Amino acid sequence: MSYRTLKHVIPSQKVNMGGHLLDQPLPTEQIESLDPFLLIHHWHQVLPGGQDQRDLGVGPHPHRGFSPVTFVFKGAVSHQDSLGEKATVLAGGTQWMFAGRGITHSERFTKQMAEEGGELEFIQFWVNAPAAYKMEAPYYQPISLEDTPLVEEDKSKVWIVSGIFKGVKGAAPTYSPQLLLRGELQKNGEVEIPITSSFNTLVYVLEGSLKTGDGQLLTKDMGVYNNNGDSISLKATADTRYIVLSGEPINEPVKQYGPFVMNNETQIMEALRDSQMGKMGILIEEFD
């Protein structure tokens, strides 16, 4: 088994998204994307309570051409979309959405969290789709903690969201080969994660610190690996929570504009037109 080395260690940057301060490890000045992964946002805040559910989160907006995926770590995230889907995903769960040819959705917090307050933490990342699938039918799949396969060894817990780890298959389907994991390591715990040699791979640390691939990752660092081995090794120097995003590069042109990810400028213009004409669906939100 040969271990990959680190190519980049990138501290996340604070960005303002509609008045919300988030940590963004991707994209940054050093790296625009890691095919097929386009963006990572880490949202972590304590809600004060005494608020209205309608004023929190992100209201209805369209997407096309990729999968926006949300890992919920603390609190809960509520989803509604133009397909009529409505679900709340609790801590440990995943909101898996494929935008395909177009979908409109909202991402809110629960009425209870708005009124009573509480800690909220989640990561949203964007996964590109191959050109052949960008205009397929959209779908939404909520995956609970209980429905996420877990491999537990000594001081390590690894939840498999997509792909195969130690013979265990994840819950989410993808349009290109990927391995998407959520992990926890207790201090001095170690885990080896086999990675297909052609996959691009990153690890992001939500909290804690890891020794890996001839370097170290601290809280809110993203490590991008060289494609020079068939596994990555992680050793925790403190209690650590992390994610692994690994996937086969799509190797196609990417043209991104706001919530649309396509292959060229013409397709972006068509997406804007279709969105304005209501062809990506209409969402009239319902609140508790």
Image (cartoon, rainbow, N blue to C red):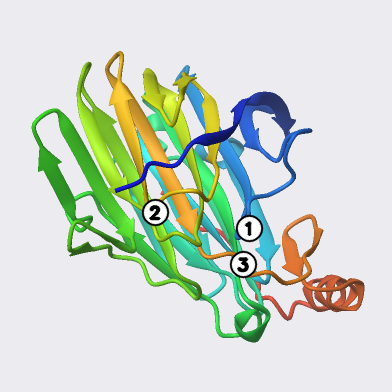
Quadrant hosting residue 241: top left
Residue at 48%, 34% in the rendered image: 204
Q: Nearer the viewer, residue 275 or 264?
A: 264
Residue 172 on image: x %, y %: 35, 66
Mark 3 closeness class: few <14, some 14–19, many ≥20 residues within 10 Å: many
Residue 195 on image: x %, y %: 38, 54
Which of marks 2 and 3 precedes in the sequence?
A: 3
Whole-angstrom CA distance, mark 1 to mark 3, is 12 Å
Residue identifier under label 2: 180
Label 2 residue SS: strand
Residue identifier under label 1: 35
Farthest residue, direction left:
154
Which of marks 2 and 1 precedes in the sequence?
A: 1
Question: Residue 200 vs residue 140: left or right?
Answer: right
Looking at the image, residue 72 lies above or below residue 218: below
Q: Nearer the viewer, residue 28 or 266?
A: 28
- Mark 3 and mark 2 in contact? Answer it, CB < 8 Å: no
Whole-angstrom CA distance, mark 3 to mark 2, is 16 Å
Q: Amino acid at mark 1?
A: Asp
Looking at the image, residue 249 lies above or below residue 238: below
